[in-house]
Image (cartoon, grey):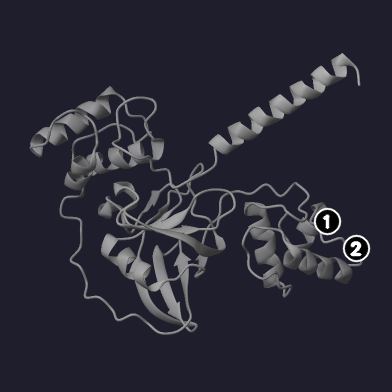
Amino acid sequence: MTGHDRLCRLTFIVLLMLCCRSMHAWTPTCGLEPGPLMPGPQANAAEVSELQERLQALGYFSGVADGIFDQALELAVRRFQRDQGLIADGIVSDATWLALAGDSVPAIRSSTAKPEGTMHLVIDTRNLKLTLFVDGQPFKSYPIAVGRQKDWYWTPVGEWKIVNKGVNWGSGFGTRWMGLNVPWGTYGIHGTNKPYSIGTRASAGCIRMFNHDVEELYSWLPLGTKVIIVGDTPPINFGRTISLGSSGKDVVAVQSRLQELGFPVGGADGRWGPNSEAAARSLQKLYGLPADGTVYTDIYYILGLK
């Protein structure tokens, strides 16, 4: 290998690393940042949009909810803080979020005795409802907030598991957090310091609950609990070849369609593993195609996804 070839190869590797880093920076998450929300271009757009919408509802802000924490929004925050007897510094800390919540926190319902049996959750992003099933039967339902359904802010449809739990991760996550094993971002079921958002599409993809509701579920659900999320999905590009090790929203859609057609994949978890590969092979054999377990243009058409 010549010196020129080595230089070209090194340049390619560096560019690839920068590309991957850039993609990672855009990985969707719940969209909440630790600490106060401060004016300026660095402010989290999802949280700023919520702040703008809440101040609009309270009559303090008349601009567009564009996710930009500019001077007009800062002045609106200061006016609100002054009226609430807070330090009017334009910085949205826990005290300001609490004041913004006002009387939107519902009365705490009486707690329910812990159910006995195998539990799983079904989250309906269309009806904004989370239902706990015990031994296959609905046991209790809760109101929720879900993703805004624009840009990156979609709640991930699929079949997931609770893989981590935490207490008081930060005021934006309320009092409890239950993380899901979604392969393309950080998503979870959590409480909120914005109770007025429950019953709306307001989050950056996570599932929000009233704090007293998520505390009840948190005490019942073990790690590994199945969480099925149903509802609308963002536009998906069905163009790449899916093979062993692939992951993503397109994988979820293919897995779901295979299951609908009677080819079991063991759950639409967004990861193309041996079960999904075996299901694809069965479909390919049925249609007289090479049974290699991959998904490509012909398979997308057979599944009705293109």
Q: Is residue 49 above or below residue 132?
A: above
Residue plotted at (38% across, 40% down): 33
Q: Are marks 2 and 1 in contact (CB under 8 Å)?
A: yes
Q: How many marks?
A: 2
Residue 298's label in the rendered image is 1
Front disc: 2 or 1: 2
Q: Position of residue 212 (x, y in %)?
A: 26, 65
Q: Which three-letter amino acid code belongs to the residue tagged 1?
A: Asp
Check the image and report above or below for 38 versus 255: above
For mark 2, give the secondary structure.
loop
Q: What type is the residue that disc 2 sits on? A: Leu
- Left or right of 243, for residue 202: left
Q: Can residue 230 be seen at all in this image of the molecule?
A: no
Q: Is residue 208 visible?
A: yes
State the CA–CA distance, disc 2 to disc 1.
9 Å
Q: Quadrant of the N terminus?
A: top right
Image location (x, y in percent) of residue 252? 64, 59
Circle nearer the N terminus (2, 1): 2
Q: Is residue 108 left or right of residue 49?
A: left
Q: Residue at x 81, y 57 (%)?
A: 294
Residue 303, quarter of the rendered image: bottom right
**Residue 289 circle label:** 2
User: Is 8 in front, or is 123?
Assistant: 8
Element at label 1: helix
Residue 60 pos. (x, y %): 19, 36
